[in-house]
Structures are given as C-alpha cells and as structure tokens.
Image (cartoon, helix red, strand yellow):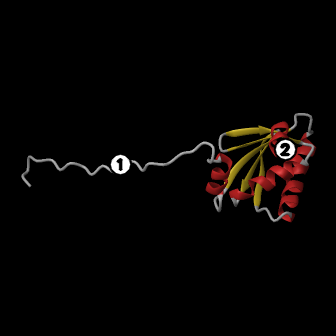
Amino acid sequence: MEDDEVEEPIVQKPRKINFDPKVFNLEKELREQRKGKPLLVMVGVKKNVSLERFHFIIPAWKDSLSNAHVEADIMPLEEGKIMVRLKRGEELDVLKEFLQSQREFSYIEYEGRKETRKQLKKSEL
C-alpha cells in the first residue's frame, strides 16, 4: 500500500429485523430488558398527605416491600415525591400492584413514562 492511498473503512450493514406489529409486545420487551438490572422509580404522593404522614410511609412501604421479597431502597426526594430504587427491575409489576393498595399513592414515573393510579387500574383490566 502506498502512502497516499487511504484504506476504506469496513462498514457493517445494519441487521434486518422482521417487525410484525401484531406479534411485537412492547411491554414484554421492556420487561425482558429490565431483568437483573436496577431501576429507578419516582413515586408521587397525594397532595393532601401531611409531612408527618409522608415521613411515616417511607419506612412502612420499605418494610411491606421487603416482606414481599422486593429489594428496594426508598428515600424522600422532596415533599410529595419518593424515589424507589429497585435492585431488580423485573419487580416493577410487584411495586405497581403494591402502590395501588396504598391510599397515599398518586402516580409513578419510570423509564420516561408516567402512570397515574387510574391508568394503572385500567391497564389491569
């Protein structure tokens, strides 16, 4: 090879994926991607919850989740907002189910999505 010749880079062609929207299930795909990976979740608490109650529910929720064998770190972010770090992202469904049973729960945010209590109930049907 001479000095003035430039070697052309090897370009890989993108892999062709057969995508059938009738078969593809986004929720199932996201669940698979979460397996074994930690997941950060923001939980909103209703505005009418007192500050005293807000600080009481954090350890209570941690104990309840622990009893359900969900490994999670729970900490307050600001008044009305709690951060939950799930050690295993696949436990998100268990967390959602638990939160629906809590009267202080307002909404949940994860992976760029925000779901309210009403939306979670509808998705269950």
Answer with the quarter of the image where residue 86 lies: bottom right
The percent coordinates of residue 32 (x first, y second) are 64, 57
Residue count near mark 1 (Cα–Cα under 10 Å), binned few <14, some 14–19, many ≥20? few
* Residue drawn at 93 percent across, 43 percent down: 103
The percent coordinates of residue 96 (x first, y second) are 81, 49
Quadrant of the drawing holding the N terminus: bottom left
The percent coordinates of residue 116 (x first, y second) are 81, 37
Q: Which numbered disc covers residue 31?
A: none
Q: Which numbered disc covers residue 13?
A: 1
- Label 2 sits on a secondary structure element that is loop
66 shown above or below 61: below
Query: What's the amino acid at mark 2?
Result: Leu
Query: What's the amino acid at mark 1?
Result: Lys
Q: Residue furthest left?
A: 2
Q: Which numbered disc covers residue 125?
A: 2
The percent coordinates of residue 91 (x first, y second) are 75, 58
Q: Residue furthest top?
A: 47
The front one of 119 and 15 is 15
The front one of 1 and 28 is 28
Do tag 2 and tag 1 residues touch (Cβ < 8 Å)? Answer: no
- Label 1 sits on a secondary structure element that is loop
Q: Is residue 21 left or right of residue 61?
A: left
Question: How far apart are labels 2 and 1 at the CA level?
Answer: 43 Å
Residue count near mark 2 (Cα–Cα under 10 Å), binned few <14, some 14–19, many ≥20? few
* Residue drawn at 76 percent across, 62 percent down: 71
Of labels 2 and 1, earlier in sequence is: 1
* Residue drawn at 57 percent across, 45 percent down: 20
Tally the marks: 2
106 shown above or below 99: above
* Residue drawn at 84 percent across, 44 percent down: 125
The front one of 14 and 8 is 14
